[in-house]
Image (tube, rainbow, N blue to C red):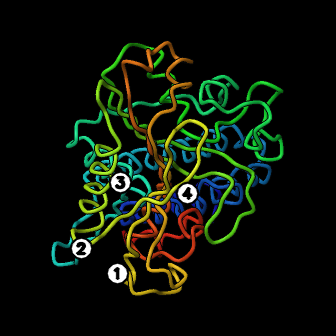
Amino acid sequence: MSLFDDITAGKDQALSELAATTDAAGLEAWRVKYLGTKGLSRQIMQRLKEAPSDQKPAAGKAANEFKNALQAAYDEAIKKVGATAAKGPVIDVTLPGRKPAIGREHPITQTINELIELFGRMGFSVAYGPEVEDERHNFEALNIPPSHPARDPLDNFYINPSVMLRSQTSTVQVRVMEQGPPPIRVIAPGRVYRPDTVDATHGVMFHQLEGLYVDEGVTMIDLRTCLDQFAKAYFGPQMTTRFRPGFFPFTEPSAEFDMSCPMCLGKGCPVCKQSGWIELGGCGMVDPNVFEAVGYDPQRYTGFAFGMGIERMVMGKHGIPDLRLLFENDVRFLHQF
């Protein structure tokens, strides 16, 4: 067969195969076969040198027309296949649906929101403050003198000699009192930082919730009632509470606030070290020196403050034995809450 015959036969065969192709994969295979670098169109171009001299112009024209016709037909087929694909795949409504993965709040966030709602029912608003603090708000205004061991550089994350990552959210109480006169009733949740050895009950970062109530005539009875109502509302009405004498530079008198162990209900277990009690935090009446530091008249105003670890709330309520489980981001653990 002559070159012209091969061109005609090749064109008929190519167009016939293209007409029978209905998907993108088939079109790509057809393109490689006829328009690729080793396809039929390239082979015909390479055979032009075989044509007699007087037939080369006509053969070249026929070869170009062959290639252009195949290219045009291919472009048209691509448009048709694309239009069909744009209509979307056929959906089999009998197949089971795919359940989307829905996230949820971290147990610490859940607990913070619960505590905000609980204390909100007692009339407490929420206040926030910076996590990078100066010495005045972190220590001086809280009646913690330079000689106090709490200010030791080994017990704090100092950025420079007078700036640090806050070690307590009591700093927010000072900032709130600096903004205006009593009455004040706020809670301050947030992250705090201390260079503790990481173990089942300690971490270098944890969460605190501090509370402050300042007004005329506030007494220790108000503090005792507030924390007792909190424990019963959050952990259950079966909980009992107690105060133990304690010491904090910013409260006087001060107390440690304990609750009957939610694991054993006061009978004694490894969680409470067989004592039947777990410590929730510290509390007390605001020291007059703190009032003087923020410009309040300690002869006119009294108030109470308390602080508790939020991780301890989570662990006590859900029976979590190790603090580190809350921060390992193991979804198998977090999905339980």
- 251 horizontally vs 335: left or right: right
Residue indicated by mark 3: 81
Q: Which mark is residue 84?
A: none
Q: Residues within 10 Å of mark 4 (few under 14, many from 20)?
A: some
Mark 2 touching mark 3, by CB under 8 A? no
Mark before the other along the chain sequence, 1 or 4:
4
Front-most of 79 and 134? Answer: 134
Mark 1 touching mark 2, by CB under 8 A? yes
- Residue 7 in the image: state x and y as whole percent: 57, 56
Mark before the other along the chain sequence, 1 or 2:
2
Mark 2 touching mark 4, by CB under 8 A? no
Query: Element under label 2?
Result: loop
- Residue 158 in the image: state x and y as whole percent: 78, 35
Position of 50 relative to 314 (above/below): above
Q: Measure the C-alpha gap from mark 1 to mark 2.
A: 8 Å
Residue indicated by mark 2: 238
- 214 horizontally vs 160: left or right: left
Amino acid, disc 4: Arg
Query: Element under label 3?
Result: helix
Q: Measure the C-alpha gap from mark 2 to mark 3.
A: 71 Å
The residue shown at (22%, 42%) is: 122
Amino acid, disc 3: Val
Mark 1 touching mark 3, by CB under 8 A? no
Q: Measure the C-alpha gap from mark 1 to mark 4.
A: 78 Å
Residue indicated by mark 4: 31
